[in-house]
Each structure stands twice: as C-alpha cells, then as structure tokens.
Amino acid sequence: MNLPILYIILPSFIAVASLIIRKKELVYRLLLIVLTFALGVGAIFLSLRAGNTGSTLSANEQFIVLGRSLNVTYTDLPLVGMIYLVTAGWLVAAFFYFPHEFFPAFCVIYTAFIIASISIDPFLYSVLIIFLANAIFLPVLSSGFYGHINGRMRFLTFQLLSVFLILLAGWILAGGEIAPVEEDQLFISFILLASGIALWLGVFPFHTWIPLLAEESSFYPLGFMLTLLPVSGILMLMKFLNNFAWLREYSAFFPAMQYLGAVMIFLGGVGAFFQKTTARMAAYVFISGIGMLLCGVGFIPIVSTDLVSAWLIPIMVGFWSISLGMHELVGAAAEQNIECLSGKFAEKPLHALLLVGGLFSVTGFPFTSGFAPNLLLLRTASNSTQILLFFIVGGEIFLAMTCIRVILRLTLRSDKKFELPDKISVDRILIVFAILLNTFQGMFPSVLWKMISNAMSRIFPLI
Amino acid sequence: MVDVLFLILIAVIILSITTLFITDSARVALVFLGILYLCSFLLLMQVWPLGLAAVHLLTGLLTVIIINSFCASLTWKPNTPRIALDILMVVFVGVISFAFAPQLTAYFTESSQNLIIGFFLLAIGLLQAGTAQDAFRVLISLLILSLGFQIIYAPLEGSALVTTLISLIQIVLAWIGSGMVARNKEELQ
C-alpha cells in the first residue's frame, strides 16, 4: 500500500472515470460519497493504529513523480481524513440540493489536489497545484452564467500572480536553509510572500475577487472552494514557518499577520452588514472567516497552532451551513437582493436555522462551534494592542448585526403561516445533524479540537 | 548571450507586443503570441536543456491552438485613445525594464538580458491585465505575464516537475479562459 497513491492518485482517477457514468446519477454520486467517506474514515483509523505502539504498519509514505516526491505520512493522516470527511459532507448535501452533474467528480479532484499540495516535496510547488485545482474547478463554479466574467478573470489573474510571487519568495528563502539570508533579501522575500498569500487568500486590499466571484457563481460550489482554499493557504503558510527559521524570527511577520487578519475581520463584518445582495453578503462573511484564520497564524508565538486548529472546524461547518442555507433559500441566481430572504423562515425553517447557525459560527456566538475559538482569540488579542482588539471586536459586532439583519429578514416580514411538514424527508435529517453538530461543538469544543490540535502540532513541530 | 541576438530578440518581442495590443483581430493577436513563445524558446535554450525548452515551445504553440479553436473569429473595433495608451505603456515599461531590471541581478542569479526581457513581459502583461476591459485581452495578458515569469524563473529552477506543472497551468488557463471568453461573447451578442 502506498499512501500518496491511495489518497491522491486513486481518488483523482476514480473521479475522472466516474464522469463516464455521470448520467446514472444515483450510482455516480453514491460512488463518490462512499469513496470520500471511506478515505476519510480510513485515514483517521490508520492514524489511530499508527499511534498504537504494538501495531506494525507497512504502507509506503512516498511516491516519486518526475524526480520529486509526494509524501503522505501517518502524521498527516488525521488532517487528510478530516479534509476528505468535509468533502463527503459537501457531496452528501449536493446529492439532495445541487444537481450539477460535474460537481461531485470535480469536488473529489479538487480535494485530491489540495492533499497533493499539502504533501508535495519541495512544498513550494504546492502553489502550482492549487492554481491548477482552482482553474479546473472554475467551470463548475460558473454554473452556466457567462454574461459577466470579470470576477472569474480577476480570480484567475490574482491566483496566477500569487503563484509567481510565492515561487520567487520560496526560491529566495530556500537559500536560507543552507546559508544565512541577508537582511534585504529577507525583506524582499517577505514582501513577495506576503503579497502572494494576500492575493491567494483575498486579504485586504486584494479581497475584491471574492465578492465579484460570488456574484457570478452558485453559492454551493463557491462555498466548497472557499472552504478548502483558505485552509490550504493557511497550511502552506505554516509549512513556510515550520521550514524557514528566518521567517519565524523575522520581527515583522507575526504582527503583520495579526493586523491583516484583524483588518479582514473588520472589513468582512462591515462589508457583510452593508451589502444589498445575498451573494456579496456571504462573500464578506467568508472574508471575515479567512481573517480569523490569519489572526490565528499571527498569534502563533503566543498560543502556537492552537488558535488555527480551533478555528478550522467552525470555518468548515460555518461555510458549509451558509452556502447550503443560501443556496436553498435564495436559489441559483446568486445576484438576488437580500429582500428575497423575507418570510423564508416559515417556508423553510430548517434551512433558515442552518444559515443563521452558520453565520453565528463565524461570528463566534455562544452555543455554536465558533464560540470557544472566539474566546481564545479575544483573550489572546486582549494582551496585544488596542487597535488590534478594536478591529476584531468591531468586525464581530458588525457580523453579529449582519446575523440580526438576516434573522429579521427571515422572520419579520412573513405573511405565511409556519407549518410543520407531514413527513420527514432524508435531507432534513442531514440538516438537523449539521445544526446539532454545530451546537455540540459549541458546547464541547475540546472533543474534535484536541484531535486536530495534536495533528497540527505533529505536522508542524517547530512552530 | 551574444548581444546581437539579445537585441534582435528584444526588438521582435517589443514589435510583437505592440502589434498584439493594437490589432483588431484575435487571429493576428494569436500569431504574435506564437512569435513571443518562439522568442522565449530561444532565450530558454541558453539556460535549459533543449528538451525542457522544447516542452515550453510546444506548450506555447498548443496554447495558441487551443485559444484559436475557441476565439478565432473574434474581432473588435480599434479604439484610438486605447491604442495610444497601449503604445505609451509599451514605451514606459520598456524604459523601466532597461533601467531597473539589471539591478535585480543582486537577488536573482541570472543574466541581466534574461531579467530585462522577463521583467518587460511580466510588467506589460500585468499592466494590460489590470487595464484591459475586454476579457480576451485579459486572457492574452495573463499568458504574457506567465511567459515573463517563466523567463525569469527558468535559470533559477530547472526541475522537470515545475516545467510540467507550469505547462499544465498554461494549457488549462488557455482552455478554461478561452472557453469563458467565447461563451461571454456569445451571451453578449
């Protein structure tokens, strides 16, 4: 058994091959759901077995391709498993709500590429793989609307530029592994790296592609991409930190990440509150979520990787809930005005709850998965400067006001009567499960968080 | 590199870029994009083995063919102020590249000729991608940007995997981009 083949190459091949049977929708979708679920559970099971001292595992962790290697180690497996389980969640919901015939296969390919980007050695090449994944995923994102393509072109431009900047920064920094880097070289590589990451993750002032893209895409595939894209970006940033001591010791790096993250939280909150269209509102909430993760990276010298790993689950659950909720309540036409949410609580109460739960998770509201990470973030930031705290708290206040605005739209203007459905359909069970998971994670945050935190500290031992 | 070859290459590149931006036909633009790939092949041959440089040339030509299959029939009305702006942009970026690119040799261990041409293509591609209104021009600008980067990056990294990935990116970009541009034009008409 070879882990890179099992977790990268095999899923990609199966996903591509499954396109042949895409007309047999049930078989096609079930195959990919079972595949991702089995890979996710299998990865976690293998990592647990590897942790047992008595067990002997003989899987090869390396796969050589064109002189370079893909390395999926037992240490990486919990993270790999979590990513596959998240994809399985998206595929299960797509089974009921998103009938796009290419989406499931491209979802699996995208996930396999993300895993490849995490596992490639030298890891600098991961940006190339992620750009490839994004470009391939773009037609699925488009969903048949081509009247305006400015957002998609800007997305391609920013992503391409970020690839080049990160590759150049990486080349300069790579010299630092064997010989000390000069101060000005370090400064140049820091600027290149920061600009590259900013373009990639949509960090202020390069965030414009996210709202533009949201206006041109369906919520559901966009939500999927914007869940995995920042996660891969943050993981790559942490690999940079883990591998280059020069960067860890560079005095401007961590404060810069803190401020960028805080500004993104503020910008996302303010932006979300003042938007008139649902697509742009969701996009700004996503920007806030990415800001939370960046803040987590910024506070690594104080709390290590704890804050990043704590925010991973709320971001994944929150983005999934917002995307699915918006998709079901607003529909495929992502440009619709926020007024279209009026009275939807009576019409689709579960989806309305899911949407509100997702928004509250990103805000860090009590009884949602974002609560504990938010407390940790605020406690850590309170020891830092007042301006930083002002941006974070200000952004969260605006996010909370956005949640209230959505709740008012969903409930107050309704002339329809609330009715309980006669029978329970299977898809409702999924929605209830997601809402309960979000609440459970809010009340008992350490259950899943400990697993992710342990995995992160093993993957990045030096930070 | 022989100075004469460098001068010929830079002259051909500047003329190709200028023609590419002021033409009113996608087909003409693609011919000159092909010429740019040929020039970059001659440059890359100085630092890469012939096989890798040939991969770059073939990828470039394939890119041109893919875009041609989607967008061959595209035409647009020439806009005089825009043409003036484009020519000014080429002159401006050309001057900046000749003045500042050689100083980058302090950071990148490669010849100043490579840096001048790479930086020129990178900067002009970036400026065009930022200022162009038309999606087709943005796509072509992205490919020029990518070409400029490859010329700068080639002496630094000669890995087969990177060449493969960059080639793949170029082909996917051309395929996805030109598909979107073609459908966008159809919907607008």
Image: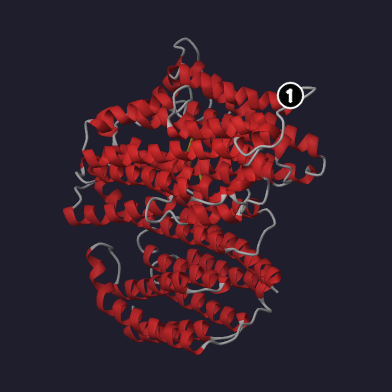
Residue B162: percent from left, percent from top: 46, 55
Q: State whether residue B1 is above or below residue A463.
A: below
Residue B159: percent from left, percent from top: 43, 55
Q: Secondary structure at mark 1?
A: loop
In front of the other: A130 or A438: A438
Judged left or right of residue B32, residue A295 is left
Mark 1, other Cα within 10 Å: few <14 / some 14–19 / many ≥20: few
Residue A272: percent from left, percent from top: 47, 46
In front of the other: A30 or A339: A339
Query: Which residue occupies 30% across, 49% down?
Result: A174
Q: Which residue is mark 1?
A: A420
Query: Which residue occupies 63% across, 41% down?
Result: A342
Q: State whether residue A148 is above or below residue A63.
A: below
Q: Quadrant of the C terminus of chain A?
A: top left
Residue B175: percent from left, percent from top: 62, 63
Chain of the residue where label 1 is placed in the rendered structure = A
Query: Which residue occupies 57% across, 32% down?
Result: A86
Three-letter amino acid code of the residue under disc 1: Leu
- The quadrant holding residue B101 is bottom left
Q: Residue furthest top?
A: A54
Judged left or right of residue A59, residue A191 is left
Residue B39 visible? The answer is yes
